[in-house]
Image (cartoon, grey):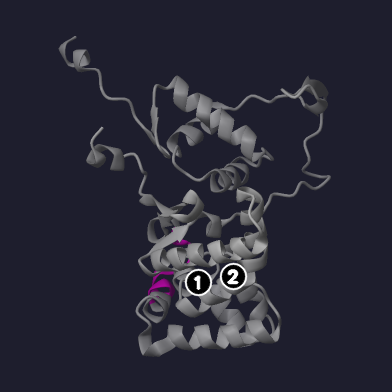
Amino acid sequence: MPNQTLNQYLQGRDSHTIDVSDYHYKANVLNYRDVLQRNRALPERKRTSFEELVEDNKEDFRDRIVGDFLKKVEAQHLKIRDFRTFKDAFRDAYASDPHGRNFFSGLSGQDDLLMRIFAEPDIQQKVTKDGETSRSRALARKYGIDVARARQLYKEIRRVEIEEISKGWIPESQLKQPRLIRSPETAPRGLQIAQRAQSGTLYRRATPRAFTSPQQRFLLNNANTPKAKLTAEFNILFNEQRTRNSVYFKQYRLLKESGRARIGRIWAEPEPDSDMFFT
């Protein structure tokens, strides 16, 4: 299928894969200006003024807010490892500052503008520093290498990631969604069944619940949304508590049944049957 045709099925999400030569480390990166949508609840006039300050860096506002933010982060010992923890730190850093608190309140939900601040080189250096220990250990486990070599690999990966971020791309791993925690009030109730895993282990799970027609349409219409983001959106939209695997495998089955083909990370519609035009 031609690339131009494939792009029609990306649903506005341009993406590509970066490859770090050592150990063939690969990561999917997304055009964050397409992935992160603006919050239409904010009045257009106020939204436009924020865009002038943040996107156009009017009167060096973005540079000044980054410098002030990092000073507060260091003073309060806040950590930034990805976009979610950046937003948490932004909120916490200005919790006692009325001007900063009002600024963050206005930007709340405007993830595309917050991402523009997050992508600044000084903040990305903070991300590199704060994420070194945990990501290096994860790389050491993944590739079976010692921690010292894993730290070198991590620095190489971050150099590539920061170069991509400077061009408007963001690694999927930095767009992590918060884990959904079930409270006693929202945890599913009802009958449980015993089920045996492929390993032979017997475990108990809630009785399977069918997906409704609107839910199935949602999964089919969001074929190329990252699994974590898809699950979070699904549970919020339908007031559900589905796990990532439940949502992902249901979507996978629906896409296969509809005849769509998977090319790399992209689900594309089947080619039209040429005979259909002559019936």
Q: Is residue 54 visible?
A: yes
Q: Amino acid at mark 2?
A: Phe
Q: Please give left or right for residue 218 compared with residue 11 in the image.
A: right
| Residue 208 image-quadrant placement | top right
Q: Nearer the viewer, residue 80 or 147?
A: 147
CA separation in Å, label 2 and label 1:
7 Å
User: Looking at the picture, does residue 125 appear above or below residue 231?
Assistant: below
- Residue visible at 46% across and 32% down? 220
Q: Position of residue 147 (x, y in %)?
A: 66, 62
Please check the rendered image and state whether residue 38 is part of the magenta-colored stretch, yes or no.
yes
In the image, the segment drawn in magenta is 37-48
Residue 92 — which label?
none
| Residue marked by disc 2 | 86
Q: Nearer the viewer, residue 41 or 228?
A: 228
Looking at the rendered image, the quarter that the N terminus falls into is top left
Kindly check if marks 2 and 1 are in contact, taking CB atoms under 8 A apart as contact. yes
Q: Nearer the viewer, residue 257 or 191?
A: 257
- Identify the secondary structure beneath mark 2: helix
Looking at the rendered image, the quarter that the C terminus falls into is top left
Crowding at mark 1 (Cα within 10 Å: few <14, some 14-19, many 20+): many
Q: Give the mark nearer the N terminus: 2 vs 1.
A: 2
User: Looking at the picture, does residue 158 appear above or below residue 76?
Assistant: above
Q: Is residue 94 visible?
A: no
Q: Nearer the viewer, residue 13 or 52?
A: 13
| Residue 29 image-quadrant placement | bottom left
Q: Position of residue 199 (x, y in %)?
A: 75, 24
Q: Please give left or right for residue 61 compared with residue 201 in the image.
A: left
Q: Position of residue 63 (x, y in %)?
A: 45, 86
- Residue visible at 27% across and 25% down? 271
Please check the rendered image and state whether residue 244 is part of the magenta-colored stretch, yes or no.
no
Residue 118 — which label?
1
